[in-house]
Image (spheres, helix red, strand yellow):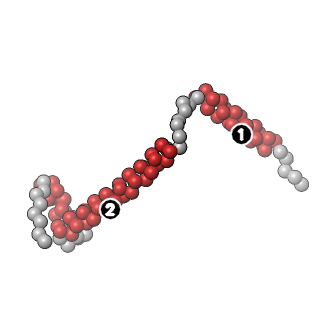
Amino acid sequence: MSTNVSLTPELEKYLQKKVQSGGYKSVSEVIREGLRLLKEKDKETEIKLKTLKLEVQKGIQSGTSSPLNMDSIKEQGRKRLQSLKKKKNERGMETPSS
């Protein structure tokens, strides 16, 4: 099968450069590699989109959301930090057993 493709001069130079570098035997090889990579990228995008749709559906099924109480969240964080600091200080004050 033969297909004609119009390329910009910039892309034409790029293809020739790829062939001249020795990495590819022909322009067709470069094009096939590019299409293979595009196909791979499309498949990855499709998988990511399916995953995202599943996660959105999980969120919808999880029930009605409620507003966040930032003051309460901050207070919980402060208490947790204070508790961690207290535990760290208690460990620092312990003496090794003989």
Residue 27 in the image: x percent, y percent?
A: 17, 67
**Residue found at x 21% / y 69%:** 29
Q: Return the mark for residue 17.
A: none
Q: Which residue is mark 1?
A: 84
Residue 37: image x %, image y %? 29, 62
Q: Earlier in the sequence, mark 1 or mark 2?
A: 2
Q: Amino acid at mark 2?
A: Glu
Which residue was labeled with disc 2?
Answer: 40
How far from the left and from the top, in percent, is residue 25?
A: 20, 72
| Residue 91 picture quarter | top right
Frontmost of labels 1 and 2 is 2
Amino acid at the residue labelled 1: Leu
Residue drawn where x is 25% and y is 62% of the image = 34
Classed neighbour count for the residue bearing mark 2: other residues with Cα under 10 Å, few (<14), some (14–19), many (≥20): few
Residue 45, image x, y percentages: 35, 55
Image point 34% across, 60% down: which residue? 43
Labelled pair 1, 2 in contact (Cβ < 8 Å): no
Quarter in which the N terminus is drawn: bottom left
- Report the front residue among 65 and 76: 65
